[in-house]
Image: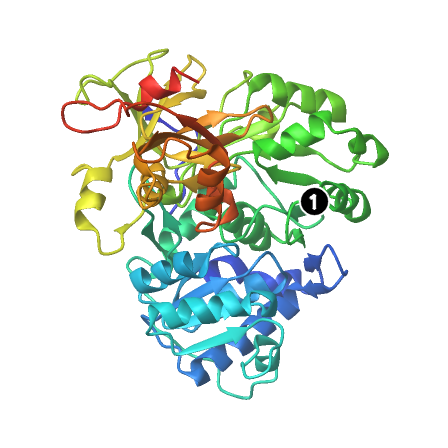
Amino acid sequence: MFRSEYADVPAVELPIHDAVLARAAEFGDELALVDGTDGTTLTYTQVDRFHRSIAAGLAEAGVRKGDVLALHSPNTVAFPLAFYAATRAGASVTTVHPLATPEEFAKQLRDSAARWIVTVSPLLEAARRAAELAGGVEEIFVCDSAPGHRSLADMLASTAPEPVVDIDPVEDIAALPYSSGTTALPKGVMLTHRQIATNLAQLEPAVPTGPGDRILAVLPFFHIYGLTALMNAPLRNGAAVVVLPRFELESFLAAIENHRITGLYVAPPIVLALAKHPAVAKYDLSSLKYIISAAAPLDANLAAACSQRLGLPPVGQAYGMTELSPGTHVVPVRDMATAPPGTVGKLIAGTEMRIVSLDDPDKDLGIGEAGEILIRGPQVMKGYLGRPDDTAAMIDQDGWLHTGDVGYVDDGGWLFVVDRVKELIKYKGFQVAPAELEALLLTHPDIADAAVVGEYNEDNNEVPHAYVVRQRTAPDLSQSEVLMYVAERVAPYKRVRIVTFIDAVPRAASGKILRRELRGRS
């Protein structure tokens, strides 16, 4: 068993809004949130006061403890206000990809039993259609303004009393993001207030932030990585968060220069752009002190090229998953210059790990031996919503979460992730379940069978590659037809990017697709 070299941290027995904003009065007029596009700013005093007013407005509208509120928005300065207001009103927040199709959104609404939606006016039609398909949604609020809908902005003037809700941080669900886990279709990950808040405390010794630090939030808040690293963690410690709604290279670089960003949390495609794109040379990025990449594997050579170009310590990596609130490993900021290339870091405080044999899961492996990564700690999820069997398959009776990732630990305690047992594809950090795409492909009348695997393209992004068996009656089915069929039915990040036609999908006697054989053909 591997244990963290950091001292244990006590569990944070607070609702997430209090765990993050407990020091808001102390930070007072320090900048908390900055809109990187229009310059709107909110101080810590304003964030604290505004989210309480919105919580009162939500409670007045009927939001109660035990409700689920779907937060459907790109990154804005209103996103944290909506999140903390909802949890203060007693709701659990299920975060929704802003590019989800109405059908995908409706599935999440039904599965989570969400009664309320908070969205933004440009996404309102998709939210309305999703609510119509799902049923059970009582009201759709907007962060900005839209005719016929109550606005969170209007709630800032609410005179209703602030709700006083008895929240049990140990049992009550703060966030309900959706993850595919190791297999199959997306499932609601139940993360309690204590699990998320404690994970923040676990991460602090390795990646400290405070007043004077400026963090650029370009990765989405709806993803657990963004929610933790770019929203909760910096706001807990008095840093300023500069918010961008999406990644566009020029506006991203301009934000670093104009707002004197000190810390970047990114995914590998952004590291690639920083390492190679000519536009980088036009901007002053000298304020940066460190870059951390997570959400997908980062090639060591690419990390080195990025750091050399920017004159920074090597890009550090972090490791975790939605089911782990999400962090378990990170390269500490103080060790970035000396950490071995390619490592995803060391265990954070209060976290234990085992590496077990792929052939014999009861056999623990030692230094330098690659096996499946198992994690135990206070950040392990409560479980999958309404799916006790899936939960039991993920977390064993001794509390070990089976990540589905393959890795090894060197003699310095550094973890290296080398493969995945699981079949999940990570496209720019977003999870794509092959089973979901395979099920969709099989609805095409001209497709007899299909399998989907991940393949890295020339930009070092893992993309869905579909291997398709044509029906005998459709020998002329083309790649473009297949690509279009999928693109019209899923969010952009889930689209199949490559199609190869084959005579038969290789399968084991059990019927399981032999994906390794397909990857070998790539």
Please tell me whether mark 1 sits on a helix, a strand or a loop. loop
- Can you tell which quarter of the image residue 453 is in? top left
Residue 119 visible from this viewpoint:
no
Q: Residue at x 50, y 32 (%)?
A: 318
Q: Residue at x 62, y 26 (%)?
A: 315
Can residue 178 be seen by looking at this rendering?
Answer: yes
- Left or right of 78 on screen, residue 94: left
Q: Is residue 308 left or right of residue 114?
A: right
**Amino acid on which the number 1 mark rests in the picture:** Glu
Q: Nearer the viewer, residue 46 or 428?
A: 428
Q: Quadrant of the C terminus?
A: top left
Task: Report x, y in % for residue 388.
Answer: 18, 50
- Check the image and report above or below for 86 versus 514: below
Q: Is residue 445 left or right of residue 130?
A: left
Which residue is denoted by mark 1 in the rendering?
A: 248
Residue 102 in percent (x, y) is at 44, 61
Q: Residues within 10 Å of mark 1 (few under 14, many from 20)?
A: few
Q: As rendered, which of 239 and 87 lies closer to the eye?
A: 87
Q: Residue at x 31, y 70 (%)?
A: 66
- Give the position of the N terminus as an image quadrant: top left
Residue 306: image x %, image y %? 68, 24
Image-quadrant location for residue 380: top left
Observer-nearest residue: 40 or 272? 272
Colour mode of the rendering: rainbow
Tell which of 297 and 380 is nearer to you: 297
Q: Position of residue 294 (x, y in %)?
A: 52, 34
Q: Residue at x 19, y 22 (%)?
A: 508
